[in-house]
Image: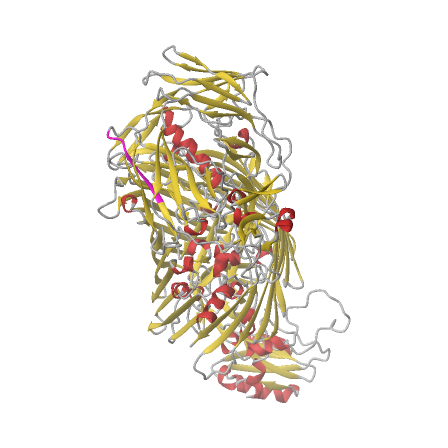
Amino acid sequence: MKKILSFIVIIVGLLALEGCVVPFSPPEVSTPGRFLVIDGFLNTNGIDSSSIMLTYTQVVSNKNTFGTELRARVTVEGNKGSTYTFTEIGKGLYRLPAQKVNPLEQFRIRIKTTANKEYLSEYVEVKQTPPIDSITYKIAADKGSVQVLVNTHDPLNKTRYYRWRFEETWEYHSPLISYFEIKNKAMVDRTSLINVCWQTARPSTILLASTAKLSQDIINDFPVTTITAASNKLRVRYSILVKQIGLTEDGFAYWNSLSKTTEKTGSLFDPQPSQVTGNIKNTANVQELVFGHFSAVSPQEKRFFVPVTLGFSVFCPPSDTLSLADALKWTDIIVSQYYPEGARFPDYIVGTSECADCRTQGGTLVRPSFW
Amino acid sequence: MKKQLLIFFLLSVFGSVTWAQNKTEKRISITLTDGTFNQFVKEAESQTGCFFYYEKGLIDSLKITIQAQNQSLTSALLQVFKGTDFKFSIDEQQRVFVTSDQAIITALPSNLFEGDDTPADQNQYVAPTTDESDKLLSTAESKTYNIGPQRQRIMEGKSAISGYVRNAVTGEPVIGAAVYIESPSIGVTTDALGFFALKIPNGKHTLKIKSVGMRDTYRRIVLYGDGKLDIQTQESVTALKEVSVVAGKDVNIAGTQMGQLKLSIKTMKQVPTAFGETDLLRAVLTLPGVKSASESSVGLNVRGGSTDQNLILLNDAVIYNPSHLFGFFSAFNPDAIKEIELYKSTIPARYGGRLSSVLEINGRDGNKKKFVGSGGIGLLTGRLSVEGPIIKDKTSFLVGGRSTYSNWLFRRLDNNAFNKSTANFYDVNLQLSHEVNQKNSLTLSGYFSNDKFKLFGDTAYAYRNQVGSFKWKHTFNSKLYGTFTGAFSKYNYSVGTSRVPINAFDLTFDIQQSNAKLDFTYFIHPKHTLDFGVSSILYKLSPGTITPAGEKSLILPDVLEQEQGVESAIYIEDRYDVNSRLSLSAGLRFSTYSFLGPKTVNNYTAGFPIEKIYLDGTTEYGKGKNIRSYQGPEYRISGRYRLTDNTSVKASYNTTRQYIHLLSNTMVMSPTDIWKLSDTHIKPQLGSQWAVGFYRNLRGNKLELSVEAYYKTIQHFLDYKGGDSLIMNHHIEAAVISTTGKAYGVELMAKKLTGKLNGWVSYTYARTLLRADDRTSPEAPNNGDYYPSNYDKPHDFTLVSNYKFSHRFSLSFNFTYSSGRPYTPPIGKYILEGVQRIYYAERNQYRIPDYYRVDFSMNVEGNHKVKKLAHSSWTFAVYNLLGRKNPSSVYFRSQNGIIQGYMLSIFGRPIPTVTYNFRF
């Protein structure tokens, strides 16, 4: 009966409510301009340096790297007379050493390119960020996932607008451990093992929250990310670094629009995409598109190790057992020795690199300093 | 008896005396004083050898005084019948026929066999056609009705005749029936209560009545003076599945109206839909000039107007959200609806308040004679309605209900996501009609709809329409009648979430309007008909209230201040038939609007755009204080010139004003869109439309061809600025931009109304473009130049066809093609914080792929035995027969730094449905 009903629903098209989504490549869009992108902020905590990256936009279908702006003059000027000049590091990156700035001063960025175009942002206030109070976690009832949540508050009720970025690092092990390797056509013991890796990811999701409509400036259990058991990130150990950035109301509107336009459009009731640029304009031509939002802020961060292990063991049998001569010619990874009954020389058990070399999954063998 | 039978062959042509044509006429000498006709006949028969036929009883009382010396029989008879209603004729065999009122025609027309097509002499004999002889059996048609105080002689001049046209079986009024005489050509259509009134020359007429789905009928009348005639008509048996788009077969030629389309419920039932249930709005979408932004939406875009520019009236009460379940179903129960009428070009002056169109939905009156019920069972919805008399022939009721059982289905699905979803809706219709007496009738109707859904277990949505209306129609005399209407409409929605306890909230929105109006129709002169009236609407709007849900919630309660406004109008419209070829209609409506306190109004620095950064304090207004007024005239002018009997040209000019706006930042109409009254910062929308049309009917009005072209302007239409939220926004005027729109197009249509194969085919070319009013604003899309609106689909082709194999079996086949909707594509990408982001082109410069769809349905009626428990019918339909994955939107997402385009299609596969309908 259940089957019949499901079938009815399918034919009625209830599942069609979910829609049918197929990939779509838009026709080549002609003559896009090449527009400046300003990525970075003035770090006002007095400890860390500030950096600004200058790049250019390109066509959606273009697979080349993004163009950079070299030899530009990048300065930040305050409305109370201070001026800071960035120095070029190369590849479009400009840096300013840590500065103690006047928290009551407002700042703007001025960029003069080699093509003699000048770009200027609006003045922005210095935004303080309260520290993260705590990072907590919640295990789903079916043990299928773990949600990481952040809590913070501003006793002064001044921050109100928040953005978070996070970086996740997890340790994982390959199912087979390789104790031998071939060096100069000889079987030798491995000096450093290749079965323990660490991988780091920086998801691009824009995480925003506002307490503007709350009576107190408290963020309670804001979900940063959900780690599924199926991803196997939680199998050994998982750590998350959450960076908290206070925003101005204008900055919040910018990131909110950017999030809506590039992450949330498309379903029937989502807003239409709109052009999101930022608070920087070409001084000679305000119509020119310029991307990026300049801010003066002191971000806060906190690291948290999720004390949960979840996941599945991967079934990964050795691929073969070979004699030394064969093993030396073979491309698979040598796992261990094996002495068949009565044999004088060991045979070698081999495994595929996917099973025996954790680096093939994208991680690195270098233990992070915080681990 | 033989003599009486002869009378039945009388035909309704004017007649006086038939002169006997034989040359050797008999002569007579006779003297009588106060003699009887019998005495005269005895004498005449003996002298002339003629034989008299007459009815003794009729002529008994006639006293004859005559002195004749060798006079011809004819002149003697003339003398005898002088001053009486008696007529006579003498045929070639010397037989004299004496009749009352009408002389017997004794000879065939002299030119009968010569093929001469000069108009036949009035007194010549015309054999009844088989069609007419059929109808002679109907006593009402064979009877002659005397209207007005009877006199011996018919007075010169004209008199008014009025009455109701009703269904003889159910007693419900027949709306939009054409009531007319052919010579001279004068006619009207019945109104929403089946009432008609027209002024025609005194004398004998055949009053013809034609209507959708009803048998054509006529009444023979003798008009002496002003009077009444109620007409009962039979439902057309053959019209069970007839497509009839316009009432009166030549209304499209003869009327001055342009862009007016009428669909009966029977026609709508033929249009296959995705969920098998008859859907009013989707049937309207098959008409030329009506589009929708998305396949799943019933938001109508009429001739380039936006979805909020349609006045949707259910029995004269405004419906704010005409859809269920995000727009997948239209909100009207097909069993409770009689028909719909759409005005997209010439809008009668009695309507106002919306820019683009009027969609009038007429509910069905209950059966005045007996209790009946009807209903249907579809795969997702079920419906039932019951109707019957409360006082036989005077008062009737109709109650209809409809609901979905999708909740029940959701719970039985294995899919986890669906298990947590709920979707529920229902609607109830009630209609009471009471005929107090010949001069007064009352109608009371109510409508309630409720939607509740929770998708994937998170946010819960609910919305409801509550609507009621009261109508009192009073006939002052046969020249003047009036209608008083009072109506109330309320629409509200709520959104709630409780997933995160500290952020749990309930958000509500509410709009209500109360309106009263008086409409009069006055037949001032046979060539002039005057419509005039007044109306007033009081709006009350709660733009949003957010309240914390639960004790843990930290959500700060927030209430957007209530808005109120009054819209009033006065109108007058004259229909003037200059001559049989030229007819004009001119209307003037003057509307005023006041935005009223109490209210705190945001001020913005003068000379700067309305932006939050230019906010400059607020001003408080007290209760009832007039904050801002707008007023202006609206012109409704149209004319028709008839080139030939079956060809005409028409032109019209219309202007409209709208004081209420729908703010939306989504592609399709969404239940959470916000209505907003015009205020200090938001001006009323203004529209104007020029239209011309050419109409030609072929094959005796069976095939209608039409071409209409229009040019339209829209001012102060609000478009979304982008980025800002529309919900709970205290500075909503800063989140929208005012735009100017223009729309133009050509609509071609061919309709075949009768026959086994019927339907229509139409092609439309139309454009709709918008431009920001403040073209230099940095927020202006497309740098302040024109950009296509979301529903700009230039080409549109529709074929709706139905083939009747028999009375019980018919097939429908529909085909739709349209250009793709515009979208805004990404044109570039850049890196920000190590992540690729995309940026978009100017608004709506690209189009999604073209849309086409084929639907098919099969209707099987149960047998037509009179005595059985229930009459039933089955509808089997396949929606999107070809299974084409028509894209309804295109979007782009950056996921893990990669930009990917996607195309979403909603009904991307053939959807077969079965519906069972019954009547008992």
Question: Is B728 on the left-hand or right-hand side of B163?
Answer: left
Q: How far from the left and from the top, in percent, is residue B125?
A: 65, 75
Furthest-right residue in view? B114
Question: Is A113 on the left-hand or right-hand side of A225?
Answer: right
Q: How far from the left and from the top, in percent, is residue B219?
A: 51, 70
Q: Quadrant of the C terminus of chain B?
A: bottom left
Residue ID at (55%, 74%) = B860
Residue A151 in the magenta stretch? The answer is yes
Q: Quadrant of the N terminus of chain B?
A: bottom right
Residue A186 in the magenta stretch? The answer is no
Chief secondary structure of the magenta span?
strand
Q: Is residue A151 above or below residue B376?
A: above
Q: How far from the left and from the top, in percent, is residue B762?
A: 62, 55
- Residue placed most toward the observer, B603 or B117: B603
Q: Is residue B765 above or below residue B184?
A: above
Question: Is residue B151 at least partly visible in the picture?
Answer: no
- Based on the displayed image, in which of its 4 quarters is residue B807 positioned? bottom right
- Residue placed most toward the observer, B732 or B204: B732
Q: Which residues are magenta?
A: A148-155
Question: Is residue B556 at least partly visible in the picture?
Answer: yes
